[in-house]
Amino acid sequence: MIIDEFTINYPFGMHYRPCYVMAKSLSEFKSTVKFIHNGRLYNAKNTQELYNAHLVYGDTITVRIEGSDEQETYAHFSDLIELHAWYLNI
């Protein structure tokens, strides 16, 4: 299990497009990807749950990744968050 904190650094927050791209790309991995925001647990592989989290610039989330490919999933998630890779449609 990998647990880490990330800060949302998208100027416009997590609107629908980055939520969709993130959920879709994470669904290709076997590991579960959950995050906590404002005391609530969300599934990062679900577009609607990501969107409903109302993540805005500067918010901090605690991410928990667990599964057989957790290292690869973590690296991909980290790229999505820190490098704005959702914008590049990776």
Image (cartoon, rainbow, N blue to C red):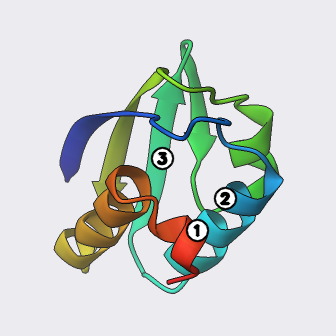
Q: Residue at x 48, y 47 (%)?
A: 34
Could you say whether the residue bearing mark 3 is in a helix, strand or loop? strand
Front-most of 76 and 12? 12
Say few, some or many: other residues with alpha carbon within 10 Å of mark 2 (under 14 / 14 to 19 / 20 or more): many
Q: Which residue is drawn at 33% across and 45% down?
A: 64
Using the numbered discs, state the Cα–Cα distance from disc 3 to disc 2 in whole angstroms: 16 Å
- Residue 87: % across, % down: 58, 68
Could you say whether the residue bearing mark 2 is in a helix, strand or loop? helix
Q: Which residue is drawn at 79% across and 35% down?
A: 52
Q: Is residue 52 above or below residue 26?
A: above
**Residue sitting farthest toward the front:** 11
Q: Which label belongs to residue 87?
A: 1
Q: Which label belongs to residue 18?
A: 2
Using the numbered discs, state the Cα–Cα distance from disc 1 to disc 2 in whole angstroms: 7 Å
Tell us which disc is closer to us: 3 or 2: 2
Say few, some or many: other residues with alpha carbon within 10 Å of mark 3 (under 14 / 14 to 19 / 20 or more): some
- Residue 50: % across, % down: 69, 46
| Amino acid type at image mark 2 | Pro
Pointer 3 residue: 34
Looking at marks 3 and 1 on the same chain, the residue that comes earlier in the sequence is marked by 3
